[in-house]
Amino acid sequence: MPHLDRTPAPVNNSPHVVIVGAGFGGLACAEELGGTNIRVTVIDRHNYHLFVPLLYQVATAALSPADIAEPIRRILSRHPNIDVVMGEVTGIDLAQRKVMLADGSFVPYDRLVLATGSSYNYFGHDEWAEVAPGLKTIENARAIRARLLMSFEQAEMCEDPARQTALMTSIIVGGGPTGVEMAGSIAELARHALARDFRRIDPRAAKVLLVEAGPRILAAFPEDLSNYARRKLEELGVVVLTGQAVEKIEPGGVTIGGRFIPAGTIVWGAGIKASPAGQWLGVETDRAGRIPVAPDLSVPGLEGVYALGDTAVLAGDDGKPLPGLAQVAKQQGEHLGRALEASLSRGEAMPAFCFHNRGNTAIVGRSAAVFDFGKRRLKGWFAWVLWAIVHVYLLVGFEKRVLVTMQWLWRYVTYQRGARLITRDAPASPLGQEAQPFVEPKRRQG
């Protein structure tokens, strides 16, 4: 079958910019190029833009997938110069300047922007992904939600107290923002939303374990904020295990420190790796698979090719690689979009990107969050309110902002969660009858 040109509209003599990936970076770049004389094609394997920072709330029944996703075509529909192609990229033909798609078609480009994001890194144990899914896709979030809720349903029908305890045990691997937010949200779900709904079990007795191989959780935050987050999690009943690496994950539990801990739900959040974009280009990447880029976000040695967000690695003012945060990708996308427009329309040189830190944040639980602005730090209720404001602002579309705000307000007042639907056949991981439940270690005094 001959390869077909999938460019939706004629390029004619106008420059054609192809953006692969409609995440924060790719979408921001496209928006900046919207309304110009430059032809733009956005390629994504999904037809929606996903607000990944709130995906953990889908996994814990606080929000529905539609609350944090918006069709790409709807977002960009007001820009007649932007076309959207739903397809999976399989490679780049650098000589012919073509983006190759899985169906055998292609999209030609004059400038190429790679904003393909990242996935979770299981550090050589990809087989763990089936048992311990991460939080990068709607499918995984729904699977976690179904497994979590099904564990309580199975515990309700179980006659063995030890097995009940094991089914109501959740283990989150990784003490970064995702792991902390997930652990706090599961604890609140069990202790509040589910507390009155069961008759034979007490969901408030559910155990939530947060496992971190490093010496403390939220390692990217100042130590005082990390300590505050740990204290708040423990107040919610979360057992925080630091300095302990996961040795094995299998259906039904996790092995830590030579001991098997049975669990009904296991969630992975211990590290990320970039998409295979570096392989498409045939360039050398860093250990996480990210493409090294020049200050103007171009890929050295490849004319007209750029990378941003989690796909790229670029040092900040402190000499350290910029973190894989939504604000980094969004700022890079906005910068690159403006720079490409100025370069292609007026022949201006591509300027260097400069990151402006808007602060790093993580929510710990109800009325508790941490916010690191560098020189200034916030924690507690005010940080929690600021976290909510920032995340609502970053949602795409006025409708989504109103819906999420109203649901958060209702949830805050009633402690309820309305997205508690088990919509797929995802029973809890099988637990051996002989498995002994986890017993919380005694905390050190002082």
Image (tube, rainbow, N blue to C red):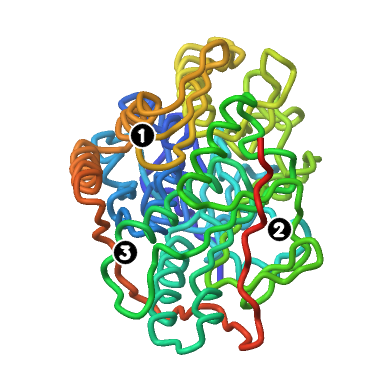
Front one among 272 and 86 = 272
* Quarter placement of the N terminus: bottom right
262 sits to left or right of 156 = right
**What residue sits 62% from the left and 45% below the top?**
175
**What residue sits 56% from the left and 80% below the top?**
162
* Quarter placement of the C terminus: top right
- The answer to which of marks 3 and 2 sits earlier in the sequence is 2
**Element assignment for label 1:** helix
The spot of residue 306 in percent (x, y) is: 61, 31
Q: Which mark is residue 122?
A: 2
The spot of residue 369 in percent (x, y) is: 44, 32
Q: Which mark is residue 391?
A: 1
Q: Residue 386's quadrant in the figure?
A: top left
Q: Which mark is residue 195?
A: 3
Pointer 2 local density, CA inside 10 Å: few below 14, some 14–19, many at least 20: some
Front one among 308 and 76 = 308
**Element assignment for label 3:** loop
Q: How far is mark 2 from mark 1, CA to CA?
A: 28 Å
Q: Residue 74's quadrant in the figure?
A: top left
Q: Looking at the image, is mark 3 or mark 1 nearer the viewer?
A: 3
CB contact under 8 Å: marks 2 and 1? no
